[in-house]
Amino acid sequence: MRKLILVKYAPEIFLKGLNRGKFERKLKENIKKKLAGLDFEIIEDQNRWFIKCDDLEEASKRAKNVFGVMEICIVTQVERDLDAIKALALEKVKESGASTFKVETNRADKLFPFNSMETSRGVGGYILNKLEHISVDIHNPECRLKVEIREKNAYVYTNKDKIKGAGGLPYGMNGSTMLMLSGGIDSPVAGYLMARRGVELNCVYYHSHPYTSERAKDKVKDLAKILAQYTEKVNLYVVPFTDIQMSIIEKCREDELTIIMRRFMMRVACKLSEIKGIQSVSSGESIGQVASQTMEGLIVSTDVADRPVFRPLVAMDKEDIIEIANNIGTFETSILPYEDCCTIFVPKHPKTKPRVDAIRKSESVLDIDSLVDKAIENLEKYTF
Ligand code: ATP
Ligand code: MG
């Protein structure tokens, strides 16, 4: 008898039809990459994956965070023999300390001489006989004992052995995006959610030296590093933004500064994506959160985009975003109090309902293309 990690992947992967094999291969490859450095093996038994590893705790911690993994279970492997299964099941239920239980059997291998019902009844009866203060509750048992019978072996586990996985789809299966990553709470969460759907992540940060400090930049690097733990690697492009902001301040109306600045952010992100062969742009905007994130604001900033712009947080409340930030480990870094380029030149009364034609006209006094090109020429690249 030995313990293994059963990996259950997202049901969405089952629905991929002819592409299912591709998704499965990618997921397995990604799991192997995450387990690199550990002494492990992935064993297959009738379409189920089991990880064998001496350090089960570390392997579980890593495997559950792989996108596409819905759940992992620490199972005990046992020979395909009803008496052996009964003995192990008794131990598991005893160990759980539960006063009610239920046995559920999944007989994947139909050659096993007892069907699912017979196996569950046999195991359940045995436990009832051996343990005094315990009863069966089929609707709401404290201990839900699972028996899986497959071609090579049987596997036993309870609800206590289950750990929720990250969900989503295998990283790298759904194209690429350029995430506008600020030091705030929202954009790292937006990046995580895109990556969780299998989208390859690249990040761009607009740095307004000397108005924003090295510490503000380091904070964004730290956020990119945290995101890289969930992905494979993350490229972070730090683009100098001061010249653009200074030109806007010098030549445009005060109440339009923010929206024009946001259009420049969008232009740089799109241009950089084009150069690097990245298909889309993503941001941490949420409808109505601040003055620049009104419907009109989002429309006016999207106006300059030449590729799809994804805003995965658009319909989320701040509380829900914070909850995810806490779960993925970015919150503590995000709330460090360093200034952001958006907060240093804030108009007193920013336009909340900008109009595309008016803004296009206002910014026509700027040499837009050369400002964008110059910013990109001077970028710094980091890879985590
Ligand atoms: P966040 O918490 O992500 O900073 P926010 O609520 O502070 O978001 P804004 O500052 O208005 O909102 O920014 C909206 C979005 O614009 C951010 O989520 C991010 O995608 C992008 N953004 C803002 N500032 C920067 C920056 N300095 N570099 C890169 N992207 C930025
Ligand atoms: Mg911000």
Image: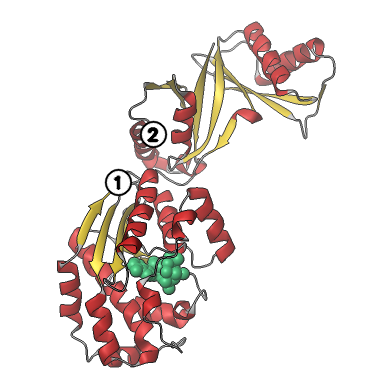
Residue 357 placed where, x, y %? 33, 91
Note whether 252 is above or below 230 in the view shown.
Answer: below
Badge 2: residue crowd in 10 Å (few <14, some 14–19, many ≥20): many
**Quarter of image, ligand 2:** bottom left
Q: Is residue 72 above or below residue 376?
A: above
Kind of residue sitting beneath label 1: Lys
Q: Is residue 20 visible?
A: yes
Task: Name the residue that disc number 2 marks.
Answer: 31
What is the secondary structure assignment of the residue under circle 1? loop
Q: Position of residue 355 (x, y in %)?
A: 39, 89
Q: Relative to residue 6, is residue 131 drawn left or right?
A: right
Q: Residue 233 got which mark?
A: 1
Q: Residue at x 36, y 21 (%)?
A: 39
Near mark 1 (Cα within 10 A), the count class, few <14, some 14-19 or many ≥20, is: some
Looking at mark 2, is its residue's CB closer than 8 Å to ligand 1?
A: no
Q: Is residue 284 visible?
A: no
Indicate whether 270 appears above or below 14. below
Image quadrant where residue 379 sits: bottom left
* Label 1 vs label 2, nearer the camera: 1
C-alpha span from label 1 to label 2: 15 Å
Q: Is residue 62 above or below residue 169?
A: above
Dot 2 amino acid type: Ile
